[in-house]
Amino acid sequence: MKKIYWIHGTKGGVGKSMTATILTNYLLDEHGAVTVVESDGSAPDVGRRFVDIDGVNTVSAPITDAASIYDALIKLEDVVAEHVVINLPANAEVLDKKADEIAEVTEALEYENRCMFVIGAGNDSARLAGNSMVNGLASICTKSIAVVNQFFGNAITDFAWATSKEAEAWVASGRAKILLPCLDRRITKNPIFISPVTLSSLADMKKSPLKITERMMVRRWLASGYDVCEQIAGGE
């Protein structure tokens, strides 16, 4: 069955774009083709990165309010792809309120919904993840994982999420919580890293434009990131 991967998180700056970027690279390497739906109109960095990459079809579908969700779903009807990554904006909780309608459309299009909910460090993020799991976007997905971005702390225990009732309920429901490894900031700030190239090409030990040490760091980080992606994209 075709699959849609919703990169959720509600708050801005928690690492949704990086998560979407890693997953897109993973699906491109695994399947040779992937569609990216960029729904963050204010900072469409994922769409910009992949716009000229072979094997990646990019679709701009900004979501700013409830009405624009319907516009995005209509655009989805014209997509022909086995794997679709939807990078959501900072106000993505608006989609949680339309979860039933989203499920009706995506199921009619014969897509299976999967979700990566990127957790921030504060209590609000844990609460919003819990809400999404109960009656929001995560609730309509056959597979969901909570992604804790190590960029904001050295361990899951640095996050309010770690000891929250929402995290307990998330795991009790059969959903997984995963730690996304952090890449050294000297690399993430490098203009080469944020340019429109695949992460795989930057990790290539022979052809990457990065320094050899930087290539090694990206390669190891990307391998760990792919392990996370396998949790959401692997299996039927």
Image (cartoon, rainbow, N blue to C red):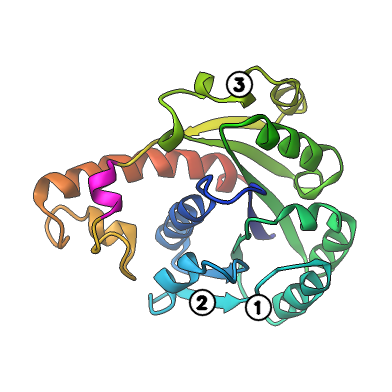
Q: Kindly identify the residue that appears in the image at 61 percent across and 72 percent down.
A: 81
Tag 2–tag 3 contact (CB < 8 Å): no
In screen coordinates, is 199 left or right of 159? left
The CA distance from mark 1 to mark 2 is 9 Å
Please state the horizontal and vertical placement of residue 93, each as a whole percent of the image.
Answer: 75, 52
* Span shown in magenta: 184-189
The CA distance from mark 3 to mark 1 is 37 Å
Secondary structure found at label 2: strand
Tag 3–tag 1 contact (CB < 8 Å): no
Q: Amino acid at mark 1?
A: Val
What residue is disc 3 on?
162
What residue is disc 2 on?
57
Tag 1–tag 2 contact (CB < 8 Å): yes
Give the mark count: 3
Note whether 5 is above or below 56 in the view shown.
Answer: above
| Mark before the other along the chain sequence, 3 or 1 | 1
Secondary structure found at label 3: helix
| Label of residue 79 in the image | 1
